[in-house]
Image: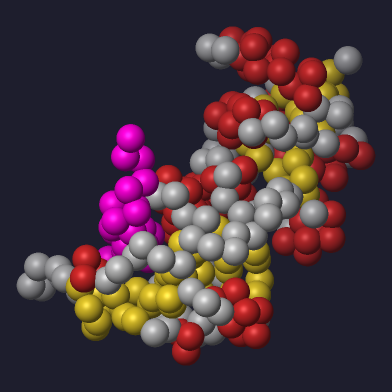
Amino acid sequence: MVTTSLANERVRYARALYRERVRTREQRFVIEGTRSVAEALRAGVRPVLAFYTGRVRTLEQGEALLARLRQAAECLIEVTPEVMASMAQTVTPQGVLAVVSMPRLPWPAHGLVVILDSLRDPGNVGTIMRAAWAAGAAGLATTRGTVDPFAPKVVRAAMGAHWGLPLQAGLDAGALAGLVNGRLAVLAAQDGRPYWQIDWRGDTALIIGGEARGAEVAGVLAQVRAAIPMAPGVESLNAALAAAVLLFEAARQRGVGVT
């Protein structure tokens, strides 16, 4: 049976999860699209709810994805394109969407972690999460002034990083100090040592400040300031680009990806 009503209880529940307070209360969030859902399934995630339209069957590997959802999802519901559009936030929904529980990966005692402080652009946050995962970071934390890492735009930009990167969200100064304790705290800054002169091989906390005001919470913890020298006339890089440069220098020094 195909669900046609926007008032369906499960449809309304999925839409409610686009509000941060509901996500926090339920400890669940929404993932959209064939790639995001497939990555979650590969990571062993079992969706609480999953929705699809008939369009999925016309996509490459669409039938295979539906077969995996039938096995993994607690509840799988076919809906009309209109109902899917009411739940999805992408301009052209791919026809599959899932409600999943927030991952609870253990926080690492050692290694490189990333602290996002007062970042308010969801695309930047998601891109940094993806870069951190790719560069072998051990975990990522956000301050209370940073956009929710489970917000829809963040989830789309992170492209599966939620399943491989331990997360702590909405931390205050005291919690951050405890997290950084024992790690070399490095603040991305325009004035500081060239980033390649810093030793990134030990336990390190990389602090990326907000686009407008910088690191409002964790900046006081910084022991080293890492600068990215640029050509004359270039004012700055955005937070995601700067983070990626520093993360992959750390990955190079650590030998991440080297066999």
Q: Position of residue 193 (x, y in %)?
A: 22, 78
In x, y percent, where is residue 117? 51, 74
Compared to residue 235, the image places residue 94 above or below, namely above
Check the image and name the residue furthest to the right: 9
Look at the image and tell me in which quarter the N terminus lies.
top right
At x 42%, y 83%, the residue is 222
- 53 with respect to 141 (left or right): right
Query: Mostly what secondary structure, the magenta segment?
Result: helix
Q: Is residue 127 left or right of residue 231?
A: right
Q: Position of residue 112 (x, y in %)?
A: 46, 62
- Identify the coloring: secondary structure
Image: magenta residue range: 237-259
Closest to the observer, 33 or 53: 33
Residue 176 image-quadrant placement: bottom right
Relative to 74, does residue 195 appear above or below in the rendering? below
Q: Which residue occupies 9% across, 68% down?
A: 231
